[in-house]
C-alpha cells in the first residue's frame, strides 16, 4: 500500500554520508510517527533525502549537505496539536524551526544545511526565499514526495474498491 522506499541501503555513497544520522535513536523514533496519513516520518524523510541527494549529485551540487539536511528537514516528534501549543506560528512555519533546533543538537549544521531545513516549506510558509540551489531541490522534492505519498495509496484504495464492486455485479446478459 505504501509508496516504496528507493534502494538507498544499496547505495554505499549515500549511506556513508548519512549513517551517523539515519540510525540515530531520535531519528529511528520518527518511524513510530504517522506522516501524510499513509507513511511514517522517518520513511518520508529518507525518501526526500535520497531523491534530493540523487538530483544534487547529477547537478554537481553539494550532495552531502543535501542528503543530510534532507534527512533532517522534518526532524520533530510532536504532532500538529503539540506544535500548535508551542505558539511559534502555523505548523508550516513552526516545524522547520523545531527540526533545525533538533538537528543542531545531534550534529553540526552548516549555513547551507540550515537554509535547506528552515526553507523547506517555501511557498506554503513565511520562510522567505531559499538562498541556495540545494534548498530549492529539497523543497521541490519534499512536495513531490508528499503528493505521491498521499495520492498513490488513495489510488490503490479506490482501485481495489472499484474492483470489489465490479466483481459483485451480475454478468451482463449478452443474449438479447
Ligand atoms: Fe516539513
Ligand atoms: Fe517533508
Image (cartoon, grey):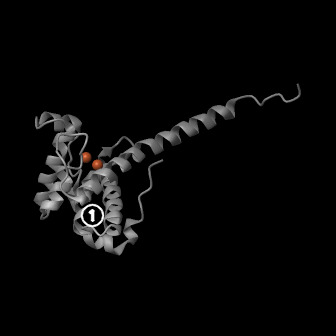
Where does residue 29 sit, x and y in percent of width and height? 25, 53
The residue that appears at 57% across and 39% down in the rendered structure is 159
In the image shown, does 93 or 128 lie closer to the viewer? 128
The residue that appears at 17% across and 44% down in the rendered structure is 127
Figure check: 166 above or below 138 = above
Q: Residues within 10 Å of mark 1 (few under 14, many from 20)?
A: many
Count all numbered tags in the image, as a single digit: 1
Where does residue 151 sit, x and y in percent of width and height? 44, 42
Figure check: 122 above or below 15 = above
In the image shown, does 148 or 157 lie closer to the viewer? 148
Where does residue 31 sit, x and y in percent of width and height? 30, 52
- Cβ of mark 1 under 8 Å from ligand 2: the answer is no
In the rendered image, the residue lying farthest to the top is 176
**Mark 1: secondary structure:** helix
- Relative to 8, 122 lies left or right: left
Residue corresponding to mark 1: 67
Figure check: 158 above or below 35 = above
Amino acid at each position: 500500500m505504501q509508496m516504496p522506499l528507493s534502494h538507498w541501503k544499496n547505495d554505499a555513497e549515500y549511506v556513508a554520508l548519512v549513517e551517523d544520522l539515519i540510525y540515530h535513536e531520535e531519528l529511528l523514533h520518527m518511524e513510530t510517527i504517522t506522516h501524510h496519513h499513509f507513511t511514517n516520518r522517518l520513511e518520508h524523510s529518507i525518501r526526500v533525502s535520497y531523491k534530493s541527494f540523487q538530483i544534487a549529485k547529477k547537478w554537481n551540487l553539494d550532495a552531502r549537505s543535501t542528503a543530510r539536511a534532507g534527512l533532517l528537514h522534518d526532524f520533530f516528534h510532536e504532532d500538529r496539536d503539540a506544535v500548535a501549543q508551542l505558539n511559534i506560528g502555523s505548523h508550516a512555519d513552526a516545524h522547520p524551526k523545531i527540526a533545525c533546533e533538533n538537528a543542531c543538537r545531534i550534529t553540526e549544521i552548516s549555513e547551507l544545511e540550515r537554509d535547506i531545513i528552515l526553507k523547506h516549506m517555501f511557498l506554503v510558509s513565511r520562510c522567505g526565499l531559499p538562498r541556495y540551489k540545494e534548498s530549492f531541490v529539497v523543497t521541490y522534492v519534499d512536495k513531490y514526495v508528499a503528493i505521491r505519498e498521499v495520492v498513490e495509496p488513495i489510488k490503490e484504495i479506490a482501485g481495489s474498491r472499484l474492483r470489489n464492486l465490479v466483481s459483485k455485479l451480475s454478468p451482463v446478459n449478452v443474449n438479447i
